[in-house]
């Protein structure tokens, strides 16, 4: 999907996103962030922060930056920041594929439910690695196509429909790992037959493979 199309789609979602998607997305976001070992003073980047569902999950002793492509989604996130008094959080409108941060800026970089949205997942991970300190942590929560052939056929059948509402359904985890050179990671599912994976990876080297995940 092109950047402008993504903006249009999420502008339309912005006022109802939490009501529609929170029940599906938030449990995995909570599980992914709960497993992190935060230290006082850690700098955290939340890429594709959306309406800010993840923001209350970060401890106040960390400095958190949330970025999103959609100004409409960020308006909802800013309301949460103000309402909850999250003064350790800064929000900015920014393209996840062109992060405006220096190299090695963050200790932890989190991307929940965005890998299937951006047009170049490998470039997203490359940018995440670039701004993460060596030895820092990369976190992903995302849908990956099922390893069960019958279910994968169903997901691939509906992929064109889901692309019209903002994300793809046909990306396999193996394809993602290969294209991004993830080689030190832990992946798990919240439930036995979950279609989403939670991934914690160590930023142990730059993303040398610019292969596109098509």
Image: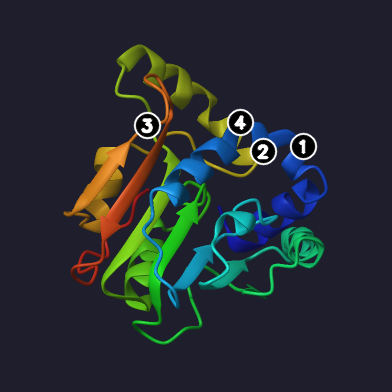
Could you say whether the residue bearing mark 1 is in a helix, strand or loop? helix
Q: Earlier in the sequence, mark 1 or mark 3?
A: 1
At x 74%, y 43%, the residue is 17
Q: Is residue 114 left or right of residue 126?
A: right
Could you say whether the residue bearing mark 4 is in a helix, strand or loop? helix
Query: Residue 107 sits in which quadrant?
Result: bottom left
The label on residue 189 is 3
Query: Residue 147 sits in which quadrant?
Result: top left
Could you say whether the residue bearing mark 2 is in a helix, strand or loop? helix
**Relative image position of residue 209 (x, y in whole percent):** 21, 64
Q: What residue is pinned by disc 4?
A: 161
Task: Residue at the far top: name it.
Answer: 150
Q: Camera-side residue: 159 or 108?
A: 108
Question: Mark 2, residues whose alpha carbon is within 10 Å: few (<14), some, or many (≥20)?
Answer: few
At x 52%, y 47%, the residue is 113
Q: What residue is pinned by disc 1?
A: 19
Between marks 1 and 3, how big is the CA–CA gap? 23 Å
At x 40%, y 82%, the residue is 105
Is there any visible trace of residue 176 in the rendered image? Answer: yes
Q: Earlier in the sequence, mark 1 or mark 4?
A: 1
């Amino acid at each position: 999907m092109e950047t402008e199309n993504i903006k249009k789609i999420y502008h339309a979602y912005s006022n109802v996103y939490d009501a529609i998607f929170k029940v599906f997305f938030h449990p995995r976001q909570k599980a992914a962030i709960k497993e992190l070992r935060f230290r006082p003073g850690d700098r955290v980047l939340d890429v594709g922060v959306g309406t800010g569902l993840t923001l209350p999950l970060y401890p106040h002793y960390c400095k958190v930056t949330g970025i999103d492509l959609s100004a409409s989604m960020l308006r909802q996130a800013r309301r949460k920041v103000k309402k909850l008094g999250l003064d350790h959080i800064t929000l900015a409108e920014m393209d996840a594929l062109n992060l405006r941060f220096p190299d090695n800026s963050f200790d932890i970089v989190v991307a929940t439910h965005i890998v299937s949205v951006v047009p170049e997942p490998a470039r997203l991970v490359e940018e995440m690695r670039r701004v993460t300190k060596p030895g820092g942590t990369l976190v992903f929560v995302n849908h990956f196509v099922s390893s069960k052939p019958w279910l994968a056929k169903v997901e691939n059948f509906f992929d064109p429909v889901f692309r019209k509402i903002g994300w793809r359904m046909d990306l396999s985890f193996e394809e993602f790992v290969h294209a991004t050179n993830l080689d030190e990671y832990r992946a798990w599912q919240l439930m036995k037959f979950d279609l989403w994976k939670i991934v914690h990876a160590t930023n142990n080297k730059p993303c040398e493979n610019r292969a596109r995940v098509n």
